[in-house]
Image (cartoon, helix red, strand yellow):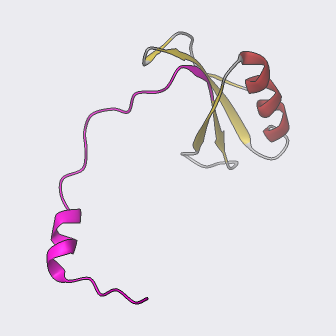
Amino acid sequence: MLVERDSKCQSKVMGRPATKPKKFKDGFYIEIRNRGAKSGIKLRRENEEKMMQTAREYEKIKDVYILGESKNGLWVSDCRKL
């Protein structure tokens, strides 16, 4: 089924971007980047053991940054590169 969009719908989608920082869920976070890239994706794991296992899998082909633990939207530990 083909649905056409009128110009009124598109104007509602556009607007000013949000400026409030995102709140992270409770858990352990790592950031995976392509080598030499400035940004990457953040992965969340429930416990530290699973986070370290995931980091070891990716460290062979990507840059891995351990962001640490988040509780109630606040960071408990500092970032470090693996």
Left or right: where does residue 19 sit relative to residue 67? left
Residue 37 x/y as whole percent = 60, 49
Left or right: where does residue 25 sit relative to residue 54? left
Front one among 70 and 35? 70
Q: Main secondary structure of the magenta part?
A: loop
Name the residue located 65 percent from the left edge and 48 percent from the top edge: 36
Q: Residue furthest front?
A: 1
Front one among 9 and 33? 9
Name the residue located 67 percent from the left edge and 22 percent from the top edge: 46
Left or right: where does residue 54 sit relative to residue 31? right
Residue 39 x/y as whole percent = 54, 45
Looking at the rendering, which quadrant does residue 77 occupy? top right
Name the residue located 21 percent from the left edge and 73 percent from the top edge: 10
Left or right: where does residue 55 sit relative to residue 23? right
Quadrant where the C terminus is found in the figure: top right
Classify 1 as above or below 43.
below
Looking at the rendering, which quadrant does residue 22 occupy? top left
Query: Magenta region: which residues?
Result: 1-29
Q: Which residue lies furthest to the top in this view?
A: 76
Looking at the rendering, which quadrant does residue 23 occupy? top left
Classify 25 as above or below 76.
below
Q: How many labels does the image show?
A: 0
Residue 32 x/y as whole percent = 66, 40
Residue 75 x/y as whole percent = 49, 15
Name the residue located 24 percent from the left edge and 50 percent from the top edge: 17
Quadrant where the N terminus is found in the figure: bottom left
Q: Is residue 20 shown in magenta? A: yes
